Image (tube, rainbow, N blue to C red):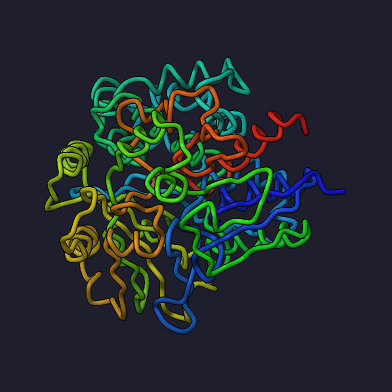
Amino acid sequence: MSNGKANVVGAGPNGLVAAAVLAQNGFDVQVFERNAHPGGAAASGSTLGEGTIVDLGAAAHPFAYGSPAFAHFDLAGHGLQWDFHDYPLAHPLDDGPSVFLHQSLDATSRQFPADRKIWRLLHGPLVRNPQEILENATSPLLGIPPHPVLMARFGLRSLPPAKLLSAAAFRTRQAAALFAGSSAHSMLPLVHPFTSGFGVLFGALGQSWGWPVAHGGTGSIIDALLRVLDGLDVQIHTGHQITSLAQLPDAELTFLDATPRQVVQIAGGQLPPRLRRRFERWRYGTAAFKVDYLLDGPIPWQDARTARAGTVHVIGDAAELAAAEHQVASGKMPDRPFVMVVQPSSADASRAPAGRHVIWSYAHVPQGHAGDAGALIDAQIERFAPGFRDRIVQRVDTSPAQLQAWDPNLVGGDIGGGSLSGTQQFFRPSASPNPYSLGVPGLYLCSSSTPPGGGVHGMAGWHAAHRALRELGRT
C-alpha cells in the first residue's frame, strides 16, 4: 500500500539513494534527470574510443566501498564488484623513490622509520575501526555521531591545518608528502583548519580497505543502484530537465539533488527569504581541470612500482603542494599544480583494449578557470615519468566550464557542491538543525551541498530521506 507520492530531481547517487529509501518505505517515487542516463558525476563512457571505459567524474572510491547506504541496499548483490591495486596510493618525489600508502599501517609506516611512531599514532585508531569512522564522517556534523568516542579521537587529529600538523609532526619529507597529498582532497589551502581531517581519514581508509575502483567503471555503481530501484518500482525519467517546481507532478515530498545555485533557479520564489539570500551567496570552491588519456602502455614512472598504484598524487613535496593550493585558492594558476592520477586499467582490464591503458587525471585550478591546464598536467606527469607524452594515443581535455555544462552541479568546475571554507564546512547549507529542509513543507535538499558533502556514497540522500520520514512519523 502506498504511503504517498514523492519526486526526486536529479539522479546522482544522492538522489537515487533518497528515491530508494522512500520507495522502500512505501512511497510511489518518480525521479527526473536532465541527462540521457542517471548518475550525475558518477558516470562512465567510451569517450576515448571503442573498447574504452572512462570515468567521466569520480574514479577511486574509498567512501563508496564502505558506504552504509550502499551496504543497506546490497549493491554487491546487484552486480557491483570492486578492483584493488597493489597500492591504494603513490606519491612520487623528485630525487628518490615514490612513497606509498599501503593497505597496511605497518607497511606504510616502515617506509619512514623516523616518523613511524607518529604516523601510527595519527592513523592507528582509525585504521582499526574503518567502518565506524566512515559512519561518523558521513553523518551530519551538528549532532551526536554514531560512535562518539572514536569521533572525539578523530576530531583531535582533524583540527589543525594540515601544513601546521605536518611541519610539527613529521621529520621526513616522505611522510609529510604522503599526508599532505591526502589532505589536499579537501580542495582547500593546507593552512585551513580541519584539513588534517582529510589527511587522516583518507589515509586511514587507504590503509584498511584501500581506495578501490568499480569494476567496469564508476557507472557500475549507478547500474547497481538502478537495479535496486527497478525492484522497488521507482520511475526514472531521463532527458527531463526541471527548471521549476511547477513542472513536477503533485507529491507529498520533493527532493532536490542540486546545489544552492540550481535550487534558487528551481524553487527560489518559494524559499524563505533568509535561506534564499544564503543560497545566493553560496561560495563555490577550487575547480578541476580534467584530462583523460589513452596510452599504448602503462605510464613509465621513474619508480616502476608507481604503475601498480590505483591513485597517484603528482606534485612533489609537501611544501610545493601547499604553495600550489594557496595559489589556486587565491585565484592564480600555478605552474606546477596538484595533479591527481588514477590508473584503473592496471587493475581492471575491461577499461581498455588489450595492450592499452586508460588514465584519468585532473588538476586543481581556480574556481571557473578559463585557461588551458592540459599542458601543465602533461608536464607534471612527464616530470616523474619521462616518456609519458610519447605514449599518448588519444586524449580528452575537459575544462571547468565543460564540466558544468555536462553536470550543472559542478559549478565553475567545483566537484564538491561548494567550498568547505569558513562556515560552509559546518553550516551546510545553513545553520538549521535540519540541514536538509528547505523551509517549505515537504521540500528537501539532498545533494553534496548538505552533510556529509562530496563523494560517491549516497549518504546525503540517505540522511535527507530518513529525516523527512521521521518528520512524517513514518519510520
Residue 305: image location, x then y, percent: 38, 57
- Front-lying residue, 91 or 305: 91
Q: Is residue 355 visible?
A: yes
Q: Can residue 347 be seen in this view?
A: no
* Horizontal side of residue 291 vs 389, given as left or right: right
Q: Residue at x 67, y 61 (%)?
A: 226
* Horizontal side of residue 79 vs 333, given as left or right: right
Residue 147: image location, x then y, percent: 61, 21
Residue 306: image location, x then y, percent: 36, 56
The image quarter containing residue 373 is bottom left
The image quarter containing residue 79 is bottom right
In this view, 168 is above or below 351 = above
In this view, 20 is above or below 465 = below
Q: In which quarter of the image is the C terminus?
A: top right
- Front-lying residue, 403 or 130: 403
Task: Give the residue at the far right of this rendering.
Answer: 1
Residue 374: image location, x then y, percent: 21, 65
In this view, 112 is above or below 362 = above
Q: Which residue is drawn at 23% across and 37% down?
A: 318
- Front-lying residue, 7 or 145: 7
* Horizontal side of residue 113 vs 245, given as left or right: left
- Front-lying residue, 255 or 132: 255
